[in-house]
Image (cartoon, rainbow, N blue to C red):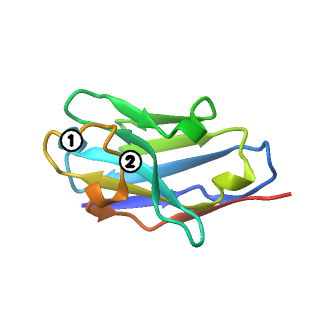
Amino acid sequence: VQLQASGGGSVQPGGSLRLSCGISGFNVNYYAIGWFRQAPGKEREGVYCISPSDGSTFYRDSVKGRFTASRDYAKKTLDLQMNSLKPEDSGVYYCAASARQGMGAWECVARNYGTWGQGTLVTVSS
């Protein structure tokens, strides 16, 4: 199982970035997949998760309307389009997977996910 996050960078407030998570080594139809982020001194928090059981999705309230996730089944990626970025969106972004059966997208917390890719740094600053 491998996850590879990319696409981070530095932008000014109001800018956009697109993150991509490359997925390999497992059948994504049986895994919950998510994007998480961690700012310095803070806990890792769920940003977006999708459940394989019913396709339900979860977006963190603070990113609703600004972030959009999409899956490219041919490229085997989970992308996260981030618009109208704010300084509080800064942090290391990780993609993760969970084989836990029956887990809903709303259970988008780091302790529920056991497979992690390396992070990609997002810095939003003027």
Q: Is residue 87 visible?
A: yes
Residue 4 appears at what percent x and percent y?
42, 60
Report crowding for label 2: few under 14, some 14 to 19, many 20 or more residues within 10 A (C-alpha): many
Q: Is residue 41 left or right of residue 75?
A: right
Residue bearing the label numbered 1: 103
In the image, 41 versus 94, the foreground residue is: 41
Residue bearing the label numbered 2: 34
Q: Residue at x 33, y 46 (%)?
A: 33
- Please identify the quarter of the rendering in which residue 122 is found: bottom right
Query: What secondary structure is marked by label 1?
Result: loop
Q: Is residue 75 visible?
A: no
Relative height, residue 52 to residue 20 (above, below): above
Q: Residue at x 16, y 50 (%)?
A: 100
- Please identify the quarter of the rendering in which residue 57 is found: top left
Report crowding for label 1: few under 14, some 14 to 19, many 20 or more residues within 10 A (C-alpha): some
Q: Nearer the viewer, mark 1 or mark 2?
A: 1
Q: Residue at x 34, y 52 (%)?
A: 23
Q: Is residue 15 left or right of residue 50?
A: right
The amino acid type found where label 1 is placed reads Met
Query: What secondary structure is marked by label 2?
Result: strand
Residue 44 appears at what percent x and percent y?
46, 62
Q: CA distance from mark 1 to mark 2?
A: 12 Å
Relative height, residue 95 to residue 75 (above, below): below
In the image, 22 versus 93, the foreground residue is: 93
The amino acid type found where label 2 is placed reads Gly
Q: Is residue 118 left or right of residue 51?
A: right
Relative height, residue 115 to residue 78 (above, below): below
Residue 19 appears at what percent x and percent y?
55, 49
Mark with earlier residue (1, 2)? 2
In the image, 90 versus 77, the foreground residue is: 90
Q: Is residue 1 left or right of residue 58?
A: left
